[in-house]
Amino acid sequence: MTHPDSFNPILFQRIANRIHETPHQRITFAEFMELALYDPEQGYYATNQVQIGVAGDFFTSPHLCPDFGELLAEQFLDMWRVMGQPEPFTLVEMGAGQGLVAADVLKYLATRKQSAEASDDYAAFWTALRYLIVEKAEGLIAAQQRLLQPFQFSPDKVQWMGFEQLPKTGIVGCFFSNELVDALPVHQFVVQDGALQEVFVTVDAESRSFTEVISNPSTGRLAEYLVEQGIDIGAGYEDGYRSEINLAALDWLETVSQKLDRGYVLTIDYGYLAPQYYSPQRLQGTLQCFRRHGAHQDPYAYLGHQDITAHVNFTTLKKQGLALGLTSMGYTQQGLFLMALGLGDRLVANNNTSDISQLNEVIRRRETLQSLINPLGLGGFQVLIQGKGLNEKEQSQVLKGLQMP
Ligand SMILES: C[S@@+](CC[C@H](N)C(=O)[O-])C[C@H]1O[C@@H](n2cnc3c(N)ncnc32)[C@H](O)[C@@H]1O
């Protein structure tokens, strides 16, 4: 018998019912992933309260230390300065998890604005700042609201709204996400007899488990996407080659670009450019599942109790961005980005102590900061900054995080 902690039978039934409603008794892998992660009542993100963090299934940069959010705050301040200090400057954080980045950004800015050494800019930026959170999982919204309680004294400083409630156009500021795009549902494709085929999910009645069916693509957008990326699967891709296509990311960027009038889109995530992403040698794509800090490739295991992700194809974000009026301002790695924002100074701070207990603390802190920039780990994440509606002068200014560290 499957243990209830490792398999959610109610979620299984909900997905099975959805499959039975369809004419061909199957759903796309993208729909399966959407339901497994975001079914409003039973999905992984809806039910699992502690899945992100040291005690959970995976952790993200803000779980290591507040420095990630604090250095991001410096980048947001710099964007505001470059844009001529607009008021309001709206920061839209999409997919905020437990709200750690928001808490670290707001706490840092609130403290700096009171510090006598800090320039007046911190106080003026604080006044101009509106922080909007777009989050899909109700349970995480509740966790974010608990954490950000101290900042809700002024009704419009921090707010939560769905994409559909955000103004249709006219936002001035920055749309920001850390590890959102890898969590969007992806279509999976397979090369069969040299042709593009799609992975669908059905229910095996006998074993009461999900199985895959390979068939013609559910939408012409998959083939168009690959052509757009310069990928010809008829050439050099062997039968059985499998990978992912994130159509949801294209739709997400379109929504963001419509709502942003002037400012930036800052996307941090793990991923590759298209030639690496769709390298013929990467036979099994980039899909990964996380449970209790272990990674594996079986999305049907631990139903409702594991995260499912796919790497981000940054080429498509750049190309789709250009088509939508978003200019690429820079593309770098998290390690370089954070160093340019001042992580190096933090690494050497308090280095001269001779007190042994302090020394241990200094070493521990240095190791934590190193993890944010380690090129084999979080430091190897990609950072893409796109701009929209900026004038020539603003456009030509190299943002702080994109300068040589
Ligand atoms: C991998 S977690 C990252 C959380 C956080 N940014 C961090 O760095 O810890 C992905 C987050 O995106 C949210 N999410 C996924 N799809 C979303 C969507 N379409 N709109 C808003 N939030 C979404 C999830 O609920 C979750 O909070």
Image (tube, helix red, strand yellow):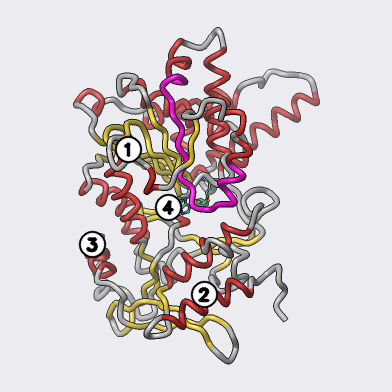
Look at mark 1 in the image and give the residue it sits on.
330
Discs 2/3, front: 2
Q: Is residue 317 left or right of residue 204?
A: left
Compared with 246, 118 (above or below) is above
Measured as percent of width and height from the top left, residue 86 is found at 33, 22
Say whether disc 2 or disc 3 marks the residue closer to the N-terminus. Answer: 2
Residue 381 visible in the shown view: no
Look at mark 2 in the image and give the residue it sits on.
15
Look at mark 4 in the image and give the residue it sits on.
181
**Amino acid type, mark 4:** Val
Discs 1/4, front: 4
Residue drawn at point x = 39 percent, y = 47 percent: 163
14, 109: nearer the viewer: 14
Say whether disc 4 or disc 3 marks the residue closer to the N-terminus. Answer: 4
Distance between the alpha carbons at the discs numbered 1 and 4: 18 Å
Q: Which residues are magenta?
A: 125-144
Helix, strand or loop for disc 2: helix
112, 168: nearer the viewer: 168
